Image (cartoon, rainbow, N blue to C red):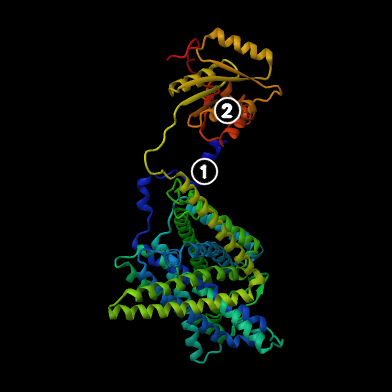
Amino acid sequence: MTRSWAVLKRLLVGEPFASGRGSSLVLSKRYAIPLLAVNPISSIAYAPEQVFLVLGLAGTAAYALSPWTGLAVAAVMCAVIASYRYTVQAYPGGGGDYRVVTANFGPGAGRLAAAALVLDYILTVAVSTAAAVAALVALMPGLQPWREWAAAAAIAVLAAFNLRGLRVSGRFAAGVTIAFVAGIAAIVLTGLVRLAAGDDLAAPAAERPEDQREWTSAALFLLCARAFAAGSVAVTGVETFTTRVRFFRPPRGRNAAAAITTVGAATVALFTGTVVLAFLVGAHATPVDGLLQYPLIAQLADTVFGGSPAARWPVMLATAGVLLLAANTAFVGFPQLASVFAEDSLLPRQLHKRGDRLVYSNGILILAVAAALLVVLFGGGAYELIGLYVVGVFLSMVLSHAAMSRHWRRVLDVERDPGRRSRARRARATAIAAVLACTAVLVIVAFTLFRRGGWIAVLIIGGCYLLMRAIAKHYAAVRDEIELPPGKPKLPSRSHAIVLVSSVNLPLMRMLSYAKGTRPDTITALTVNVDAAASRRLVAEWDRRRIGVPLTVLDSPYREITGPIAEYVKARRRDAPRDVVTVYLPEYVVGLGPQRGRLSRGYYNWSASLLHNQTTKALRRQLKYEPGVMVCTVPWILGESTEPPPLRRIPK
């Protein structure tokens, strides 16, 4: 079983890397901008159509509000981008939202930000892969019935890619990102130019009959607010820069701020242009079973370029490619972030351990399973997942920008230089504006999308927070308990060895040899009398062999073995609390010996282990909670050929 798993692991993951190779797997500086730009840029693939999806509920007449809704989203994006510019300069070490919140509000708020970031990364993978499949469905409609399984398969492929310690080529990432940006820019610019020239452009979906439902002003206002909150998903990805500042050349903070400005400006321009063009050509976005039959990007490409497949295929393939790259960056970032959480005792320490290929394998597997589960549960539709996504993203942003507001207030309390004080005031005002904008989005989502899946996000974040709190309390309690007290440590007064005896054989002699080799103060052989005749034969054999270790026989009227042994050991501890008692137990290992003998030729297999070691396991369960009692299992590999130790006497 173990060997089969090892072979399967080598096939899936590959041969392990030596620790010294770790530096070669760190992303170089030239990879930073193309890989980090993928996250915010990729939101253009699904954020604009979220505005039209929500407004479409009020009928096609409500699309007249789409440009204003898009401008409101753009204002939120500008406020967040401006605030993050100051964040990366104030924390050039790559703190990220978690570090910023913890440094300014303490570990409690830091845990809440960490829980929100966990959901953020999970939904980055889920939403990106679901949107990528939607882009491919526009090219291959037959894929639609299998969209959730196609997205789950894409997640599995990305997880396997990262488990093998592979990295996306910087040139490839840059090429896909530039192709996507160029495609969207070409659509927007060509469409606006043709409209300005007087061409009559109408999206194919514009022929849909007008919806005649009546909406009150209050209901229409709430719908616009909901469209604004759904479209604000375009802000996602900007926070990635705060965790990867170290990838930039010194001065890292200034270079990261310049990169945020460049990528953010491009994202805002493309988002606004896409929304305005979609309104002008009469594009529609109507979900069918949670998936757009005709994605907004595909509609615009067909409208602007006359339905030419030569235009649609490159644009949609670039869209799917940039979305899969965005999901892949989450597979790179989440395990590293989970490692930071584990280092700070918020998650199990196993997440801080690198695997065979020098990647955080446990974090990759957890992310893949969680994202695939959400994709399948929500039917592979990005539309349903957006509400959850916005909750996680904007909760962490609200905490982060509020923390930066407090940071700049502290700077103003101690800074006396006029120039630096002026800069701190601007930064604080920007952070406050970002807090207000993100809070507005979060409140709108809480009121409008709570029943449509938002409660799942709250449940996940709350569960992660409570789990992190419990883990932190446990690790703190363990750390306090095992901390070495001041002064000279107290050593045990005496050491006692107890060897369990069932019969006189080779495993027994090995246990006695090992016990004698530890030089205990006393050594006792112990057996339990559950069969009087067998016990008499054992004592007679013991005396005949003249083993030289006293044999103690415990009576057991009810034929129980583990109980009398455990009580005997506890009594030794009660009589001398400062003494240490080591109990030696035999353990038979089945089917792992050299390839000779009956036991290694197939007569025994892994299931034969059920026939052995049951008493040893029971004793270990009872004794492991006893202070001052050590349990030592001495293995005997069945099928092993060894020279037997002398049976007459144990050498002194």
Residue at x-position 68% and y-position 12%: 533
Picture quarter with the N terminus: top right
Between the C-alphas of marks 2 and 1, the distance is 48 Å
Q: Is residue 512 left or right of residue 503?
A: left
Tell me residue 583's x, y (percent).
53, 27
Disc 1 crowd rating (10 Å Cα; few below 14, some 14-19, many 20+) is few
Placement of the C terminus among the 4 image quadrants: top left
Disc number for residue 571: 2
Q: Secondary structure at mark 2?
A: helix
Marks 2 and 1 close (CB-CB < 8 Å): no
- Extreme residue in the front direction: 575
- Badge number at residue 616: none
- Answer with left or right where residue 425 lies relative to residue 455: left
Q: Quadrant of residue 227?
A: bottom right
The answer to which quarter of the image holds residue 421 is bottom left
Question: Which residue is identified by label 1?
Answer: 9
Foreground of the two, 82 or 407: 407
User: Residue 436 versus residue 577: which sits nearer the camera?
Assistant: 577
Q: Pointer 2: residues within 10 angstroms few (<14), some, or many (20+)?
A: few
Q: Position of residue 582 (x, y in %)?
A: 50, 28
Q: Position of residue 9 (x, y in %)?
A: 51, 43
Amino acid type for the residue under numbered disc 1: Lys
Residue 212, given in percent of the width and then of the height, sits at 71, 87
Question: Is any part of residue 320 visible from this angle?
Answer: yes
